[in-house]
Image (cartoon, rainbow, N blue to C red):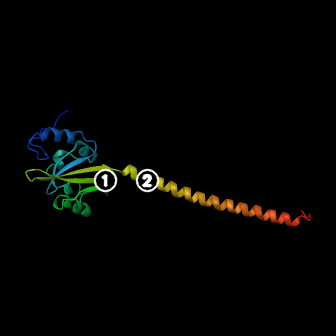
Amino acid sequence: MATRQWVHDPLGDPKNGLVLTRAIIDTIHEPLIVLDEDLHIIVASRSFYKKFNQTRALTQGKYFYKIGKGEWNIPQLRKLLGSVISKHKVVEGFEVKLNLPYLGIRTLLLNAREIIFENGQKKMLLSIFDISEQRALEAVQENLLTQKDLLLKEMRHRIANSLQLIASILILKAGMVKSEE
């Protein structure tokens, strides 16, 4: 298996950062992207390339919103990620739905943080978690809970009707009895 040969550290650390950065980026299981101040992709993890059907040649140096067929070009996402470096904001748990031609509609959870180096360089780490299955299970669970509530309501109604019928029969029978008891 071939290893990537980076000439410099993608995170910009001039002191021994290359080995650590390469190890982290190449072994992380969830998609991870390193962006520069202008939101150009510096490097992405293998899991990003695999998950989103991309390659290093198609992404490295490209504007984040122009990768693929423009499916990442969402105004709210652009604004949010633009504020990470410019306004020193942290993004945690931003949920976005994308219609990816090779995966269909996916629900993604994004986290982003700014990194500022001693030399003033700024980068952004962007992690992406696919929570589509989790959201689908939550929808199924919500549907089951709604059905359960409906069935309980129907059962209570039927029990009340049955009890009312029994009470009516008892009252009728009691009226037919001539005994003082």
Separation of residues labelled 2 and 1 (CA atoms): 15 Å
Horizontal side of residue 181 vs 45, given as left or right: right
Say which label, 2 or 1, has the lower sequence index.
Answer: 1
Tell me if I can see residue 44 in this picture. yes
Q: Residue 83: percent from the left, percent from the top?
A: 20, 61
Badge number at residue 175? none
> Among all residues in the image, which is located at the extreme bottom?
175
Q: What element carries label 2?
A: helix
Which residue corresponds to the image point at 28% horizontal and 42% vertical from the top-left?
29
Tell me if I can see residue 102 in this picture. no
Residue 87 position (above or below residue 116): below
Quadrant of the drawing holding the N terminus: top left
Badge number at residue 138? 2
**Camera-side residue: 60 or 121?**
121
**Disc 2 residue crowd, few under 14, some 14–19, many 20+, Cα 10 Å:** few
- The amino acid type, in three-letter code, at marker 2 is Glu
Horizontal side of residue 106 vs 112, given as left or right: right
Q: Name the residue under label 1.
A: 109
> Among all residues in the image, which is located at the extreme right?
179
Q: Residue 61: percent from the left, percent from the top?
A: 13, 51
**Camera-side residue: 136 or 174?**
174
**Camera-side residue: 69 or 83?**
83
**Label 1 near label 2: C-beta < 8 Å?**
no
Quadrant of the drawing holding the C terminus: bottom right
Which residue corresponds to the image point at 28% horizontal and 55% vertical from the top-left?
92
- The amino acid type, in three-letter code, at marker 1 is Leu
> Among all residues in the image, which is located at the extreme top?
1
Which residue corresponds to the image point at 21% horizontal and 41% vertical from the top-left?
24
**Disc 1 residue crowd, few under 14, some 14–19, many 20+, Cα 10 Å:** some
Q: What element carries label 1?
A: strand
Q: In which quarter of the image is residue 149?
A: bottom right
